[in-house]
Image: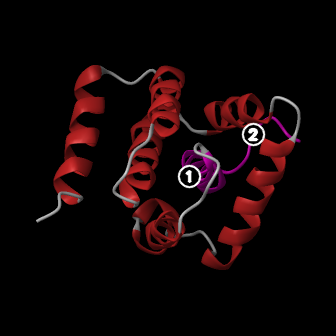
Amino acid sequence: MSDQIPLQEALIYVMVITSAADNSMTDRELFSMGDVVKTLPVFRDFDGERLVTVAQTCGELLQEKDGLNVVLDLVTRSIPAKYRDTAYALAVEIAAADLNVNQEELRLLQILRDRFDLDKLTIAAIERSAQARYRKA
């Protein structure tokens, strides 16, 4: 595996590891990933047909020895500092997609916050925004 992957692939890896944190990927999480790739400007030049292949590659890496750390190291090297808040926002989006953020996902979000060296105000704004979007009536 190379030292870096393209930005869009790294962002997909972040979504995949967030979804897989609790050992299950729900339909809502998968739908959210597809929706994100179709609609966000950061994915404008990404071929959406490759989403499944990129997600599968990430899944294969996760199956290797110390797979989560391998993926975390790879995305940390591959995502430039100015996109790390975007990566964290995508992780929060996927965690919130099934309206139930569990302990494993919370722990992964903490790891991402630390890896991406995000400030507390940025973290709070991203998390509050997700709460507002996913609030039930």
Q: Is mark 1 on a helix, strand or loop?
A: helix
Residue at 27% x, 21% y is 120
Extent of the magenta region: 1-20
Q: Which residue lies furthest to the bottom in this view?
A: 49
Q: Is mark 2 on a helix, strand or loop?
A: loop
Q: Name the residue under label 1.
A: 19
Say which quarter of the image contains residue 9. Answer: bottom right
Image coordinates for residue 24, horizontal then vertical, percent: 61, 55
Q: Is residue 100 above or below residue 114?
A: below
Q: Is residue 105 above or below residue 51?
A: above
Query: Which mark, by number, is residue 4?
Result: 2
The dominant secondary structure in magenta is: helix
Q: In which quarter of the image is the C terminus?
A: bottom left
Q: For this view, does 43 lie left or right of residue 89?
A: right
Question: For the residues marked 2 and 1, what is the alpha-carbon distance in whole angstroms?
Answer: 22 Å
Residue at 44% x, 33% y is 106
